[in-house]
Amino acid sequence: MKTTHIIGFVSILFLLAACDGHPGFEPEIAQQVAAAQIDPDAALAEKVEKAIGLGNGSLAYGVEVTATDGKVELWGTVDSTAARKRFEVTAAGVVGVRAVANHIRVDPGA
């Protein structure tokens, strides 16, 4: 067995063991990350986007989502404080999100 294969296998084991100790980080996601070398921050941002309805064309808001180490940041403009709060609360409820920084501005004409 080549050294690179052993290192890769050990890295995957460490990743799975570390994820097992973090409540809210789903084992299936950990396995996908390990197997496909998926960026966990990008995967979390995508999960939040799906949860708040971005990407499916149902919302006309220009909201962007970024994630770093479980901290999600929301950027953009919405037409009401209720919409701003709804995005924040929904993002906070996504598995894997540890904190939400809501930078969304309210513009009633948006």
Image (cartoon, grey):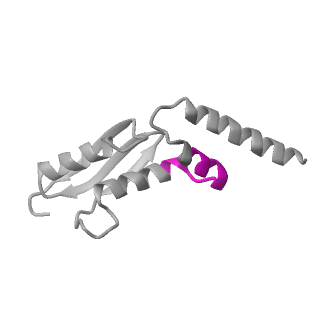
Number of numbered markers? 0
Q: Residue furthest right?
A: 1
Query: Does residue 55 sit above or below 51 in this rendering?
Result: below
Most distant residue in the left direction: 108
Find out whether residue 22 is within the magenta segment. no
**Residue 58 percent location from the top left of the image:** 25, 68
Q: With 71 as the anchor, is 6 left or right in this view?
A: right
Q: Position of residue 102 (x, y in %)?
A: 27, 44
Where does residue 78 sit, x and y in percent of width and height?
A: 18, 57
Quick one: which residue is furthest to the bottom in this view?
57
Residue, x 48% and y 52% (percent of image)? 43
Tell me the chief SS of the magenta region.
Answer: helix
Q: Position of residue 62 (x, y in %)?
A: 27, 63
Residue at point 55%, 42% (across, down): 27
Residue appearing at x 45%, y 36% in the figure: 24
Closest to the observer: 85 or 76?
A: 85
User: Is 46 left, or right, of 76 in this rendering?
Assistant: right
**Quarter of the image where the C terminus is located:** bottom left
Vertical placement of 16 versus 43: above or below? above
Say which of 34 and 39 sits in front: 34
Left or right of residue 3: residue 81 = left
36 lies left or right of 41: right
Q: Which residues are magenta?
A: 30-41
Give the farthest residue toward the front: 28
Q: Is residue 17 above or below residue 85?
A: above
